[in-house]
Amino acid sequence: MIPKTFNEVIDLGDGREISIETGKLAKQADGSVVVRMGDAMLLCTIVSNKEASPVDFLPLTVDYREKFAAAGRYPGGFFKREARPSTEEVLTMRLVDRCLRPLFPKDYHAETQVMIQLMSHDDNVMPDALAGLAASAAIQLSDIPFECPISEARVARINGEFVINPSYEALQEADIDIMVGASEDSVMMVEGEMKECSEEEMAEAIKFAHEAIKVQCQAQVRLAEKVGKKETRTYEGEREDEALQQKVYEASYSKCYDIAKQGSTKQERGEAFANVKEEVKALFSEEELEENGDLISKYFKIAHKEAVRDVVLKEGIRLDGRKTTDIRPIWCEVNYLPSTHGSAIFTRGETQALATVTLGTSREANVIDLPTLQGEETFYLHYNFPPFSTGEARPIRGTSRREIGHGNLAQRALKGMVPDDCPYTVRVVSEVLESNGSSSMATVCSGTMALMDAGIQLTKPVSGIAMGLITDGKDFAVLSDILGDEDHLGDMDFKVTGTEDGITACQMDIKIKGLSYEILVKALKQARDGRLHILEKLTDTIATPNENVKAHAPKIVYTEMPEDCIGAFIGPGGKNIQELQKTTETTIVINEADGKGIVEILGTNQEGIEKVLKAVEALTFKPEVGSVYEVKVIKLLDFGAVVEYMDAPGKETLLHVSELAWERTENVTDVVNMGDVLDVKYFGIDPRTKKEKVSRKALLPKPESYKERPKRDDKRSGGRDNRGRDNRNRDKNRD
């Protein structure tokens, strides 16, 4: 049976189209669509269980995978099967998840899985920009409860013009690259990087993306109407008890309000709020607690959240006693770790990050091998968030999606300030040692100082700040440098990084509908003031990058050699280069480019680096005809001496006995001995011997009594040259 398909087309206005199709594939899923742009095709499905899970949150999983077959490629390595997701795939999962999660009902707890797969790749299409559209379209075709359609779009500014969903090649010329997630009514998510753009330019880019997203949301509605909009499923929501809620509220709100305005530390607040919760629970019998314990905890959280928010809105006081625009106390230190190539500590309030820098060759570059992208990163940053940073003890299950996302944000914030001519591969690692909000921004700040401490000549230092928002629909307060609780209890988490001249990266998550551009612009301007304040603290600690790398850090030197010399330099099975690395205590990497061998020499010992340079010079040394060179006798033969050029150790040639002196030389040792250093003149290739010819006597004055030996007459013996002819058995043939 031929399936009936439904299709909706989105015109991007520049000749490109996005199509959304359903009805052909994966029909057992609750919702499935194929989103196509050019030759790129994404299959997205959503399935949600009918029964709720025994948890008090939405167990939503968003999975995004790029199939190697989509690009006609094989997975790398020995295991020819797609395995764990790449960093880039995880980042796309996070982009989609952050837009979808807030739009499910708060009391919907059914296990829900969104799966997005790249089935066909187009080099001119970046599929991650289509993932949010695909996910929302699949949900709209299902009966799963969801507030409204959303979509995501990449907007880039190329040559002063904004472009929606550009190709990867075009993106390389952009000075703004952001992903925006939004519904028709409001912006929900922003993430991207910029080349020091202004706050106004960023707001303009967000508005441009939002207009394109509105069109994509309308297309989803039309497609759902064509198919036939399913009636939203009924589900068992959370149990409610208004009388119980009122009792908990009356017993806890005022106490939480008083604690919130005291301006205490995280630990003090935590203990105080916990004591209030215990007092509330004490109002109930054991039987009531057993029956309604979960409800009591839930209602206490609601009262606690409302109290904290009200203190901010009504009194302008935050949990730690700050005003809305205040930044927590900051202290910094560089060169803390003696053995690293660069290190720095950044502490802001109860958040602390220790960053380290490691310098290496191109061999240490981060290799990217995806169906959609292949290449290398010579600057990358890793972010680690151990459980002790929040005073917890819990199992470590590998690198979390959050760690990957925060590390990527910090990397995007800093990479634009690393100069293009930096000779090193640079790895920054941030260890979060304490956390009470804005640990990713602490990573940016510590990373900046660590790079400067390592001697990386950053164009400009970068700082970062996390902004928050609390609003009741009428009044609002934008918070600078938010705490962990303010992130959890607030309505926005807006991270902004930049130099004194502009924004370099951002990440914004909004938890409410209808965020006005007025609030957005205010948050951006307030963030700028905070960034500049933090930046001043960084430059007070280390004003400019160190002129040189540390004494124990490796120095890197580049040189070149002809392409045809690479094999001889490496040697059979790498024997020569391995021995050279061992004896000089260096790392040598050779890359081929433009018909030349680019040699990278990395080492801490300058003497070892010089030896490698001399070895390269020796291999590429070519004496010029008529020039005089200093040589050293390294071997004596009956017919001459083997000499080594002093300018090119290892480069040898034969100084024939006849070229030692004008006088007849019976023994080579009559003129030279082992280890003697002398000058010779280079005559190029001898046409008779086809070998290089050098002469000592050519530099000596010719004796007046010297007579040139007559040249041999080759016409003797009838013009035949019998040299080398074997006549040993000539007599055997005579009669």
Image (cartoon, grey):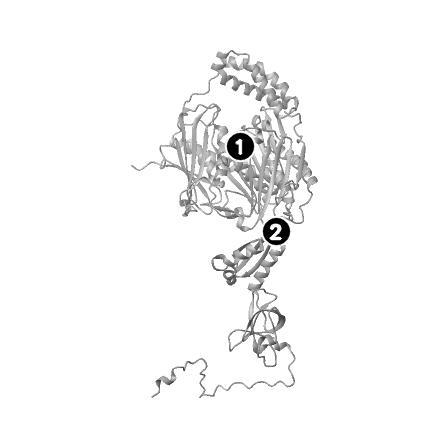
Q: Residues within 10 Å of mark 2 (few under 14, many from 20)?
A: some
- Above/below status of 508 relative to 309: below
Q: Which is more foreground, mark 2 or mark 1?
A: 2
Q: Nearer the viewer, residue 148 or 635?
A: 635
Q: Nearer the viewer, residue 155 or 336?
A: 336
Left or right: where does residue 388 sit relative to residue 38? right
Which amino acid type corresponds to the residue marked 2 in the rendered image? Thr
Q: Residue at x 53, y 36 (%)?
A: 403
| Most distant residue in the left direction | 1
Mark 2 vs 1, N-terminal side: 1
Q: Quadrant of residue 29?
A: top left
List x then y, in percent, for residue 64.
45, 38
User: Which residue matches tag 1?
Assistant: 188
Which amino acid type corresponds to the residue marked 1 in the rendered image? Met
* Cα gap from disc 2 to disc 1, whole angstroms: 50 Å
Which type of secondary structure does the marked residue at label 1 adopt? strand
List x then y, in percent, for residue 126.
48, 43
User: Which residue matches tag 2?
Assistant: 604
